[in-house]
Amino acid sequence: MKKVLLSFVAALVLTLPVYIGIGKNEWVNDWFINGAGWDMFTPLFRLCNAVGITGDGGILITAMLISFVLVLVASAVVRRAKLRVSTRRG
């Protein structure tokens, strides 16, 4: 249980600053305000049959959650690889 909690905390530590940085970045905000950001996500919106801003927002939140899960898996893999290397040396 402790290992799962450590992976979860590592994923939060790695993911949240990126989300905050993206959200506070003026360039990214201007990119979405001008419409180019939304245009980039249009294929994903069409694939998921998103309707309106609520559907678009749900897809973006889901994409962020998927990225969090990917970071969680990556942190677990790195932690496990580090443990294997340390046990071989010791």
Image: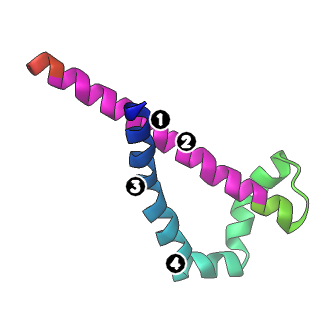
Q: How crowded is mark 3: few (under 14 residues within 10 Å), some or many (20 or more)?
A: few
| Residue shown at 38% from the left, 34% from the top | 2
| Residue shown at 73% from the left, 67% from the top | 38
Q: Indicate left or right for 89 with 70 as reference.
A: left
Q: Quadrant of residue 32?
A: bottom right
Going from N to C along the chain, the mark reached first, 4 or 2, is 4
Q: How crowded is mark 2: few (under 14 residues within 10 Å), some or many (20 or more)?
A: some
Quarter containing the C terminus:
top left
Name the chief secondary structure element in magenta. Answer: helix
The extreme left residue here reads: 90
Discs 2, 1 touching: Cβ within 8 Å: yes
The Cα–Cα distance between marks 1 and 4, rounded to whole angstroms, is 26 Å
Residue under label 1: 73
Going from N to C along the chain, the mark reached first, 3 or 2, is 3
Near-viewer residue (22 or 75): 75
Going from N to C along the chain, the mark reached first, 3 or 4, is 3
Residue 20 locus on image (x, y percent)? 50, 69
Check disc 2 and give the amino acid type: Val
Q: In which quarter of the image is residue 59?
A: bottom right
Going from N to C along the chain, the mark reached first, 3 or 1, is 3
Residue under label 4: 24
Residue 32's disc number: none
The Cα–Cα distance between marks 3 and 1, rounded to whole angstroms, is 14 Å
Residue under label 2: 69
Quarter containing the N terminus:
top left
The Cα–Cα distance between marks 3 and 4, rounded to whole angstroms, is 17 Å
Near-viewer residue (38 or 6): 6
The Cα–Cα distance between marks 3 and 2, rounded to whole angstroms, is 13 Å
The magenta span reads 58-86
Residue under label 3: 13
The Cα–Cα distance between marks 4 and 2, rounded to whole angstroms, is 22 Å
Label 1 secondary element: helix
